[in-house]
Image (cartoon, rainbow, N blue to C red):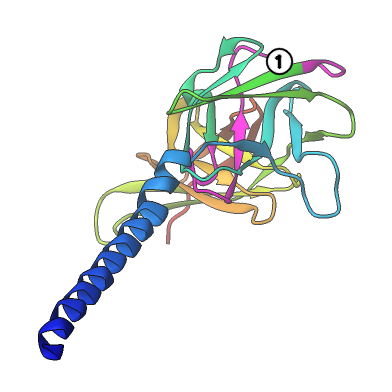
Amino acid sequence: MVEAGVKPRRGLRFKVFVALVLIAVLIGALWFFVLPYLFAYEKLDLVVLPGHSNPWYYWVTNSKGEVRQLTIGFKNSGTKELKVKEIWINGTLVDSADWGGYFGKTIEPEHTTTVYVAPGNLTFKKGTSYNLTVVTSRRNRFNFTLCVKDYNTKLEKVKISGCYFYYWPPDSNHKVIGIEVKDLSGTDVIIKEVFINGSSFIVSPRLWLYEFSSEGDIEISYPWKKGMTYTVTVKTVAGSRFEVNKTAEFP
């Protein structure tokens, strides 16, 4: 009679144990997979550098004295991957070709990126505040008020430090002009176009000269002739132009 009464109790304990394990697994799955998805959110903030209280952004003056570019740091303070889809200034949509991010347009949670905004038809005015609206792929909108002041406006300056005429690949008849560009201003400079004797060549992808690593190369296919002199000009997204005259030489 004793043995007959023990077996059911052991079976009940086993069932209770299995039930508790299943409940724990379900709670774990809910905690790690369901709840983060349900409660994930987007949040975009301006970068504040260590030791500073103001957000990090500045305006860029081009070689003609016009303030034509905004450079700004963003941080994804949310829990979702954030993709910037649109940028608006004072209620006007900025063309997608007139803005971009150093690390692309996607920002991972707790990561930062630098973004430039250079509307082709807008010159920023000192002493004026602008409303910047960022729209994400999930249609969330983040608004920032930014003011153009003397202390946060910088003059960009670029030097064409080298211009070379060669064949690439070396054993081919394909002629190219290699252009070395150096950022002298301490600002982020984005090269978008090259002119050779007035002929335009779009730089794609654009050459981004970051202020802490300020040299880069551009290679343009061009049927140069040895002994001829060429005027080579680089143009930035802010509208600056810098040029050099160089005679084609090849060993």
Please tell me which residue lies in front, 150 or 238.
Answer: 150
Q: Nearer the viewer, residue 186 or 74?
A: 74
Q: Is residue 64 above or below residue 247?
A: above
Where is residue 37 drawn, in percent x and y? 40, 43
| Rendered position, 79 above or below 22 | above
Q: Residue at x 80, y 54 (%)?
A: 50
> Percent x, y for residue 24?
35, 64
Q: Position of residue 143 (x, y in %)?
A: 66, 23
| Front residue (pair 165, 113) | 113
Is residue 35 visible from the viewing direction of this image?
yes
Q: Residue at x 61, y 27 (%)?
A: 117
**Image-based side of 22 in relation to 11, left or right:** right
Q: Quadrant of residue 225?
A: top left
Where does the magenta region start and end?
A: 101-129
Which is the main secondary structure of the residues drawn in magenta? loop
Query: Looking at this view, is 128 or 205 the one in front?
Result: 128
* Residue drawn where x is 65% and y is 53% of the image: 214
